[in-house]
Amino acid sequence: MYDTKTVWSGDKLKELVKYIIGYQKALTYLSEKKDKKVVDAFLRASDLSENDLSDKKKLETARRSVSLYIKDAYPEINPLIYTLEEDKEHRTYKYSVTSRSKGIKKDTYIDYSFFKSPEYAELKKYIEYFKKLGNPPYKISSPDKDVLVKNTDDLLESVLATGKSGLTIQRYKGLGEMDPRQLWDTTMDPGSRTLVKVNIEDTVLANEIFTKLMGDQVEPRREFIQENAIRVRNLDV
């Protein structure tokens, strides 16, 4: 049952949404090296740390908890293959977790290096914050209806859907597609606009990148996006 005594609204709800989005982005940055769904399961369903990697009993308990979580949250990658291996460098053990999604195999290592990484430290920060929510399910209340959700991802989706109710979202390829009122609201109002000065130190490199991104050739642009997508932090869509 959801906690009927704890209510998140206003600025507190905004902060929660911000943390959920941050957590999702942090997981996405890991997706090149690990299956983010496996990492999410270990973070949410177990309390493992680097200090537990020498304890086979704790590792087995964590595996069982993660397996149950995966079955419920990510049935599309279930079953997983868990292999407990020796980590001779750190004199501990590590899990190699093999998952498949749409026919693509990925091995995710839950080991000493992972727990000591800055990526883990960032993810753990979000997990500690989510503990304030208590255990799911959670109830989203709005003037129209109440909705029960089973995790923070569904909570975010429901909150955003409620917030967008009655709104119309428009997208433009450029300023030339906007009418005067839209230009004023988005870019031209002196009270809200931001002017940024850009200094070009390497004109040759700048010209090469500009040609690659804005030129007629599609393939170099596609390669640039694929190579740099994992490094994106702020994306204006």
Image (tube, helix red, strand yellow):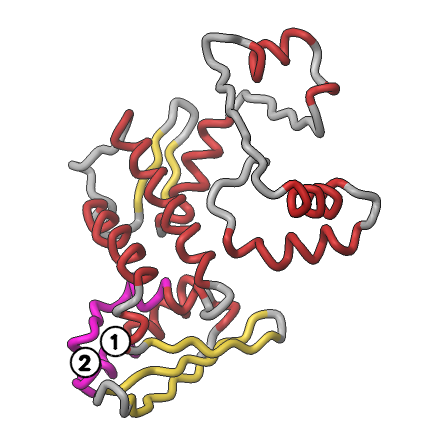
User: Local crowd at mark 2 within 10 Å, few (<14), some, or many (≥20)?
Assistant: some
- Queried whether the magenta region covers residue 60, the answer comes back as yes
Residue at which label 2 appears:
58
Q: Residue at x 17, y 85 (%)?
A: 55
**Residue positioned 51% across, 24% down in the render:** 196
Is there a contact, CB below 8 Å, between mark 2 and mark 1?
yes
Q: Which residues make up the magenta segment?
A: 40-64
Q: Position of residue 96 (x, y in %)?
A: 39, 83
Dividing the picture into quadrants, the one containing residue 206 is: top right
**Residue 42 in the image, given as x and y percentages of width and height:** 31, 68
The correct choice, above or below, for 218 with respect to 50 in the image is above
Q: Residue at x 62, y 75 (%)?
A: 103
The residue to which callout 1 is attached is: 62
Q: Residue furthest right?
A: 216
Q: Amino acid at mark 2?
A: Lys
In the rendered structure, the answer to whether residue 229 lies left or right of residue 114 reads right
Q: How crowded is the residue under tag 1: few (<14 C-alpha within 10 Å), some, or many (20+)?
A: some
Position of 133 relative to 166 (above/below): below
**Residue 119 sits in which quadrant?**
bottom left
* Position above or below: 196 against 39: above
